[in-house]
Amino acid sequence: KNVCVFGLGYIGLPTAAMFAHHGANVVGVDVNPHAVDTINQGKIHIVEPGLEAIVKQAVDKGTLKASLTPEHSDAYLIAVPTPFKGDDHTPDLSYIQAVSEALAPLLEKGDVVILESTSPVGATEQMVEWLAAARPDLTFPDYYQPDHEADIFVAYCPERVLPGKVVEELISNDRIIGGMTKESTKKAQEVYRIFVEGNLLVTNSRTAEMAKLTENASRDVSIAFANELSIISDKLDINVWELIELANHHPRVNILQPGAGVGGHCIAVDPWFIVNQNPEEARITRMAREINDGKPKWVIAKINEQIEAFKQNGVDRPKVALLGLAFKPDIDDLRESPAVNIARDMLDANSAEILLVEPNINELPKSLIAGKLVELDSALEQADIMVLLVGHNQFKAVSIPHDKPVIDAVGIIKFHEVN
Ligand code: SAJ
C-alpha cells in the first residue's frame, strides 16, 4: 500500500513512521522544510521517546520519505493543526482546506481520504466539499446517504495517544473509524489494520468527530471538579488530597487530581470546539474550561498572600522558588503550560525574586528569559517561599523543608506529612 500523510507533527510523524515500519510505502508531507530535511536524514524534530529509531529505520529502508509536495497514493491521511481564533474560539480549518486543495488533483477513483485532525463536528463533510469543488469529475460521499457509494472513500479517524507514550499507544489503543459511507469505514479499517493491534471500532464520521472532543472534554470536566474542590477545601481548611483519596474509596467515585491548571494542546483546546458549536447547550463544558483556565490565577493569589506576609515582616523582596514548568509531570514539554504562565506573570509583577526549577530542561523558553533557572537543591536552600507547580518525580524524591511556607498545587506533600 502507498500512504501519503499530511502534517509531520506530534501525530502525523509517528503515524507515518508506523505505516512505513509495517511495510507500507509512505510519503510524509509538511510545509516546514526544516522538518522535511531532518526526517530525510533519519532524525526527528520533535521529542517523543522511541520515535527516532523507528523513523531512522524506515528512512534507511526507503519506506519513509518526507517531502514538501504530495504524491499519488492509495490512502491519504491528514494530521494538520486545527487551532481556534478569537474570543468565541472559532475553529480555524484553513490547514485542512490547504491540504484538500493540494491533494484533490491527485485523487483517483477508489482512493481513501482520512481526516485525523481534531475537528468540530461536520469538518469531514466540509473537507469533502472542498475536494468536490476541485474535482467535479469525481463523486464523493454524502453523510446522509451512507449506503450510497462514491468514487472516493472518506472517513474521520481520531487518534487518542498520550504524548510521551505515542509509539506504544498508536499500536495498542482501540481506534474509532468513522466512515461517511459503509464502504468508506471498511476501507479505512483496512488502512489502520496495517499496524493497529487494538480494536477498530466502527461508526459514522460525525460520531467519530464528536467522540474525540467528548473524550477530552470529559477529562477536562473531571479535572475542573477536582480543581473546584481544591479551592473549596483551601477555604474550609481541609486537605484536598486527603479528601479525594478518602472519597475515591467509594466503589463508584473516581475523582481526578487538582493541579496548577490544565495545559497541553488537547484538553485545554478541544472542549472549546463543542462550546463554539453549541454555545447554549454546552454549559458544563464551558464552565469546566473557565474553572481550569482560572486555576493559575488562584495559585498566583496564594503566592501573593505569602509575599505580602514577608513584606509586612520587613523582607522587601522574598525569594520565591517555582518548582516545575512543564505542562504535566515527567516531560520536558512547556507548551501551553499553566506553570509557565504563572512564572511569566510572577516575573512581570516583579514583586519578589523568582527562582525557576525545571529538571527536564537546560534553558528557559523565550517568554521566561527574564527568569533564573536554578538547580532544585539550590532553590530549596535559598527560597523563602516554595511553590510546587508540577508533580515531577524529582520533586517527590526530595524532602521539602517544613519550616518555610509551601504552596503545593499538585499534592506532592501528602496529607500525612503535614498533619
Ligand atoms: N491534569 C490534572 N489532573 C489530572 C490529570 C491531568 O490537572 O488528574 C492536567 C495535566 O497536568 C495537564 C493536563 O491536565 O496539564 C492534560 O494532561 P493529560 O495527561 O490529561 O492529557 P494530555 O493533554 O497529555 O493528552 C490528552 C489525552 N486524553 C485523555 O486522556 C482523554 C490523550 O489520550 C489524547 O490523545 C490527547 O489529550 C490528545 O491529543 O487529544
Image: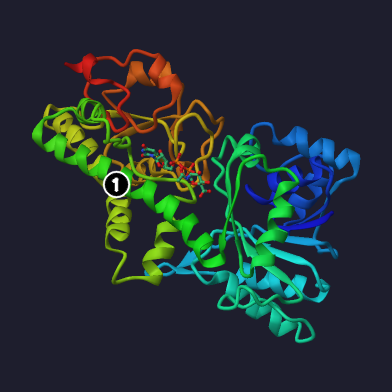
Classify residue 325 by image quadrant: top left
Residue 218 in sight from this viewpoint: yes
Q: How many marks?
A: 1
Q: Is residue 306 left or right of residue 319?
A: left
Look at label 1 and name its amino acid.
Ala
Where does residue 10 sit, x and y in percent of width and height? 63, 47
Where does residue 321 sit, x and y in percent of width and height? 34, 28
Q: Is residue 163 left or right of residue 223?
A: right
Classify residue 123 by image quadrant: bottom right
Q: Residue furthest left?
A: 236
Classify residue 68 by image quadrant: bottom right
- Which residue is drawn at the image coordinates 32% and 35% (left, top)? 257
Quadrant of the frame with the N terminus: bottom right
Give whichever of 356, 20 is nearer the camera.
Answer: 20
Q: Is residue 2 above or below residue 232?
A: below
Where does residue 235 sit, x and y in percent of width and height? 11, 37
Q: Please give the residue where the numbered disc 1 appears in the rendered image.
A: 224
Q: Is residue 261 above or below residue 186?
A: above
- Which residue is drawn at the image coordinates 54% and 40% (left, top)? 162
Scheme of image coloration:
rainbow
Q: Is residue 42 left or right of residue 284?
A: right
Where does residue 119 sit, x and y in percent of width and height? 53, 63
Residue 268 in sight from this viewpoint: no
Q: Is residue 2 above or below residue 225?
A: below
Q: Secondary structure at mark 1?
A: helix
Quarter of image, ligand 1: top left
- Which residue is drawn at the image coordinates 26% and 23% (left, top)? 384
- Which residue is drawn at the image coordinates 37% and 70% (left, top)? 88
Give whichever of 375, 299 is nearer the camera.
Answer: 299
